[in-house]
Image (cartoon, rainbow, N blue to C red):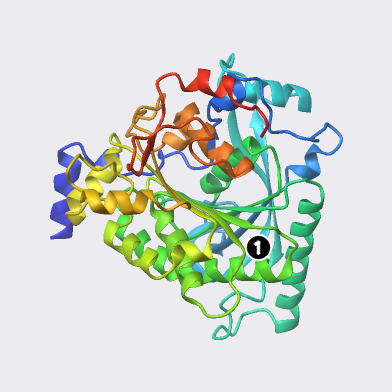
Amino acid sequence: MLSILLRMISFTGLGVLVACAPNVYDEIELMPAPTVYADTGASPFENVTRENVADRAKLFYVTDRMPAGAEDPQAYYNNERGHMLRAGTARVKIDPALATWEEISRVTLMNQRDRTYTLKLSEVEEIGVPPFSLSRYFDNAPSQQEMDAAGRSFAAVIDAQLGKSKNKDIFIYTHGYNVDFDYSSLVSKELQHFLGYQGAFISYNWTATPSRFAYFRDQESVLSTRRNLRSLVEYLSANTRARRIHLIGYSAGTRLVFEAAYQIALQKGPKARLGRVILIGSDLDTSFVLQSLEDGLLDAVEDVTFYQSQTDSALAVSKFIYGRQRIGQTSETGVVEPGLIKGLASLDNLHVIDVTDAEAADTGNGHWYFQSSPWASSDLFISLLTDKNPAERGLVREPNDIIWRFPSNYPDVLKSHDKGI
C-alpha cells in the first residue's frame, strides 16, 4: 500500500515537493542576507575581528550517526544510526574564497551579491563520546573515564566559546529529513554566521537519510533520538555557564525538538535552562501541540514560536498523507474554533508567525523560507538575538488573533525600528 502511495505521489508531480533539501549534499549556496542587515545597515558581528574570527567561528556538533568507514562515500559520518552520541567541532570554507574578514562580512551582509558563494566542510574533529550518551549495552563503548573526560572537554570548549561573546546563550539547530551530515552542518554554519558568532552554536545531527523516499524511516529515527537531544540539553544546563539554551527545529526536526522539550517539561524537579523553542515548517499535529501546552510545556521554556506558511507544498503532501492539518500550515478561515484562537492569543510566550506574505517565502516548494526569504530569516535572527516580541520586531496581527504577519512595507518598518541587535 505504501509503495503504491509513493508512486502515486511521484507520478502526480508531488514527490519532488516532499524533499527537505536538494540532492546535492556536500555543499550549499550561501543564503541571501537577512533584511535586518541588508536594508538597515545593522550588523550582528559585535566584537568579531580579523584577529579573533577563527576562534569565534567554531561550530560544534553532536551526532548519533555512525562514523564513516573506508568503504563509505561520506568523509566523516555515514547515514546509519550509531546509537552512541559523538561530539566535536567542524570548520567550513567558502568558495570562492574571500581574502579578509572585512570582505566576508561585507559580502555576506550585502543586499545584492555579485556572484554565488557556496559553503563546504573543510575539517571535522571529534572530541569523543560524552557521558550522557547511550552506551551501557555496547561492548565497544569507551570506558566511563573516557566518556567523562570527553564530556568535560566538550563543556570546556563550549564555555570557552561563551567567554568570547557578550551573548551567553547556546543555540542548537536540528535539521529536517533527506540530508546527510555535511549538509545539515553547513545549514548550521549559515545560521551561526548570521547570528554573528554570538554565544555557542551546536548542530544536532540526527540520522536522517538523504533520500526523498525515506520520510517514514526518518520519522522513526526522530523518535529514536529524542532522549539523546533531551540529555544533551540537560548536560549543557548542568555543566556549562550558558544562560539559556535555544532549540531551533526545522521540518521533521521540529518533532525531535518538540518531543525533547516536552520530555523536559514533564520531568519533576529543576528544569533545564531552555530559552526559545522555534519550530519552522513543522509537521506536528495540532492536537499533540495542544496536549503539550496543557501539560505545562510553556512553563519549562521562555517562548515557543511556530513559523508557518500557506505556500508550503511539502506540508501539503504531509497533510495529504496523514489526513490532518499540520501546525506548520496556515489554517484556512473557519478551520480553527474562534474560542481556541482567542485563548491561545492571550498566551504571552506562544507565537505563530505566518510567512506567506514574506519576500521569497514561496521559493521552490515553499518549505525553505527560513533560508530563501530575507524577511523570514530576519525575523528569526532578531528573535534569537534580542528577545523582542513579534510586535517589537515589526510584525502585525488582528485583535484576538494568534497569527502574526509581515506588513507589506516590512523593510521600511525595520529601518524605523531600533537597529540594535
Quarter containing the N terminus = bottom left
- Residue 365 position by quadrant: top left
Q: Is residue 45 left or right of residue 10?
A: right
* Residue 270 visible (yes or no): yes
- Residue 317 position by quadrant: top left
State the residue at coordinates (40%, 68%): 223
Where residue 150 appears, as percent x and y from the top left, is 73, 70
Q: Is residue 357 left or right of residue 186?
A: left
Q: Which residue is mark 1?
A: 87
Where residue 198 appears, as percent x and y from the top left, is 71, 43
Quarter containing the C terminus = top right
Residue 266 lies, with reference to residue 30, above or below; the image says below
State the residue at coordinates (56%, 83%): 138
Towards the viewer: 274 or 130:
274
Residue 177 lies, with reference to residue 84, above or below; the image says above
- Residue 27 position by quadrant: top right
SS type, badge 1 = strand
* Residue 214 visible (yes or no): no
Q: Residues within 10 Å of mark 1 (few under 14, many from 20)?
A: many
Towards the viewer: 273 or 233:
273
Q: Amino acid at mark 1?
A: Ala
Where residue 19 appears, as percent x and y from the top left, is 34, 44
Where residue 260 appears, as percent x and y from the top left, is 48, 66
Residue 98 lies, with reference to residue 277, above or below; the image says above
Residue 45 lies, with reference to residue 185, above or below; the image says above
Towards the viewer: 381 or 57:
381
State the residue at coordinates (16%, 48%): 7
State the residue at coordinates (50%, 30%): 394
Q: How many marks?
A: 1
